[in-house]
Amino acid sequence: VQLVESGGNLVEAGGSLRLSCAASGVTFDGWDIVHEHHAIAWFRQAPGKAREGIAVINSIDASTGYADDVKGRFTISINNDKDTVYLQMNRLKSEDTGVYYCAAARGTVVPDLDRRVFGYWGQGTQVTVSS
């Protein structure tokens, strides 16, 4: 299984960015991430801090969950082919700076944002918000 993030950039406070996470592949036991139920989450790791979950979506019904500090500013969505998840980030703040990772879990996990639930991870994309 592969997860590839893109869209990270340098942006001014108050601005917007959209991150993408492209999912593909099949595990050794035959689990096909695109064609089976899965959940994709976005995690953020700020310098010197632990990685924290900020948004999650289930592929089966597009139900979502958010961390409190991004509610109303960030929106997670999934495309019709179920192979790409987006994170629309609006009204960005300097504290949103960090490396953003997408992660996948089998089945339905919303609204769980516990990183231990997610077994597949991307390499991350850097988001820097200047104040």
Image (spheres, rainbow, N blue to C red):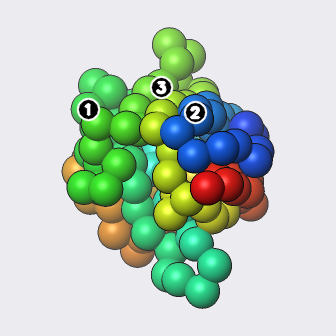
Residue drawn 28% across the image and 25% down it:
61
Q: Label 2 sits on what residue type?
A: Ser
For residue 52, which quarter of the picture? Answer: bottom left
Instruction: Classify mark 3: residues with Cα within 10 Å, few (<14), some (14-19) or many (20+).
Output: some
| Secondary structure under the numbered disc 2 in the rendered image | loop
Labels 1 and 2: the sequence-earlier one: 2
Q: Is residue 3 above or below residue 67?
A: above
Front one among 75 and 115: 75
Residue shown at the point (40%, 74%) measured from the top left: 116
Say if residue 84 shows up in the picture.
Answer: yes
| Mark 2 vs 3, N-terminal side | 2
Which residue type does callout 3 highlight? Ile
Residue farthest bottom in this picture: 48
Image height check: is 29 above or below 75? below
Determine the residue positioned at 53% across, 83% down. Answer: 49
Label 1 neighbourhood size at 10 Å, few (<14), some (14-19), many (20+)? some
Marks 1 and 2, how far apart at CA: 23 Å
**Which residue has dot 3 on it?**
78
For discs 1 and 2, the disc positioned in front in the rendered view: 2
Residue 128 sits in quarter: bottom right
| Residue 35 rendering spot, x and y as whole percentages | 52, 28
Report the residue marked by disc 1.
63
Q: Position of residue 5 (x, y in %)?
A: 71, 45
Circle 2 packing at 10 Å, graded few (<14), some (14-19), many (20+), is: some
Secondary element at tag 1: loop
| Image quarter (top left, top right, bottom left or bottom right) of the C terminus | bottom right
For label 2, the residue is: 16
Pointer 2 and pointer 3: residues touching (CB < 8 Å)?
Answer: no
* Residue at 29%, 36% in the rendered image: 72
In front: mark 2 or mark 3? 2
- Label 3 and label 1: CA atoms lie apart by 10 Å
User: Would residue 3 be found to the left or right of residue 40 on screen?
Assistant: right
